[in-house]
């Protein structure tokens, strides 16, 4: 089981590195010509990063490593504070528009 978890995490980390690769000369050229909206690209990258952290957190939950899972879930809510599935995975429940500690479903 350790090897499966390590393999999945290695793949997730590799995917994260691909997602946040440094700008190529094509990106720089497009940006110089105002054809490139950096803010949109930044937001898309953050969304992908949040998704990766959520997936890694789910892997840690399945492997019974709750502390590591929560670390990744906390990273998701830092990036996306309104991500309800992640707040629920952390054991919170929504009450009056706020997330409060509660029981997991």
Image: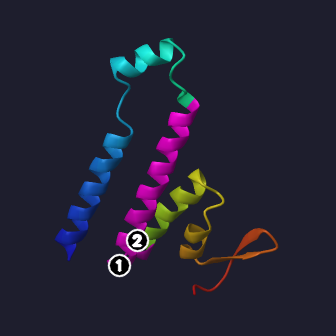
Residue projecting furthest to the front: 35
Of the numbered discs in the image, which one, if any, rests on residue 44?
none
The part of the chain drawn in magenta is 39-66
Q: Taking 13 as reference, is 86 above or below it?
A: below
Residue 8: give x, y in percent of width and height.
25, 63
Q: Taking 11 as reference, is 102 above or below it?
A: below
Side (left or right) of 37 relative to 25: right
Q: What colour scheme has been applied to the protein in the rendered image?
A: rainbow
Within 10 Å of the Cα at label 2, are there few (<14), some (14-19), or many (20+) other Cα atoms? many
SS assignment at label 2: helix
For the N terminus, the quadrant is: bottom left
Residue projecting furthest to the left: 3
Residue at (53, 74) in percent of width and height: 89
Residue 96: give x, y in percent of width and height.
82, 73
Q: Taking 56 as reference, is 42 above or below it?
A: above
Q: Real-space Cα distance between discs 1 and 2?
A: 6 Å
Q: Is residue 20 magenta?
A: no
Depth check: give the residue in front, 5 or 25: 25
Q: Taking 38 as reference, is 44 above or below it?
A: below
Residue 104: give x, y in percent of width and height.
58, 85
Residue at (62, 86) in percent of width and height: 103
Residue 36: give x, y in percent of width and height.
51, 23
**Contact between labelled residues 2 and 1, with CB atoms less than 8 Å apart:** yes
For the C terminus, the quadrant is: bottom right
Within 10 Å of the Cα at label 1, are there few (<14), some (14-19), or many (20+) other Cα atoms? few
Q: Is residue 50 magenta?
A: yes
SS assignment at label 1: helix
Q: Quadrant of residue 101?
A: bottom right
User: Please, what is the dominant secondary structure of the magenta stretch?
Assistant: helix
Residue matched to label 1: 62
Residue matched to label 2: 58
Residue at (38, 63) in percent of width and height: 56
């Amino acid at each position: 089981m350790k090897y499966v978890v390590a393999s999945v995490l290695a793949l997730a980390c590799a995917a994260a590195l691909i997602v946040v690769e440094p700008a190529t000369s094509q990106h720089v050229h497009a940006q110089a010509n105002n054809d490139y909206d950096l803010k949109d690209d930044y937001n898309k990258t953050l969304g992908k990063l949040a998704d990766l952290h959520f997936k890694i957190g789910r892997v840690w939950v399945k492997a019974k490593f709750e502390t590591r899972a929560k670390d990744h879930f906390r990273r998701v809510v830092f990036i996306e504070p309104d991500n309800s599935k992640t707040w629920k995975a952390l054991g919170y429940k929504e009450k009056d528009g706020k997330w409060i500690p509660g029981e997991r479903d």
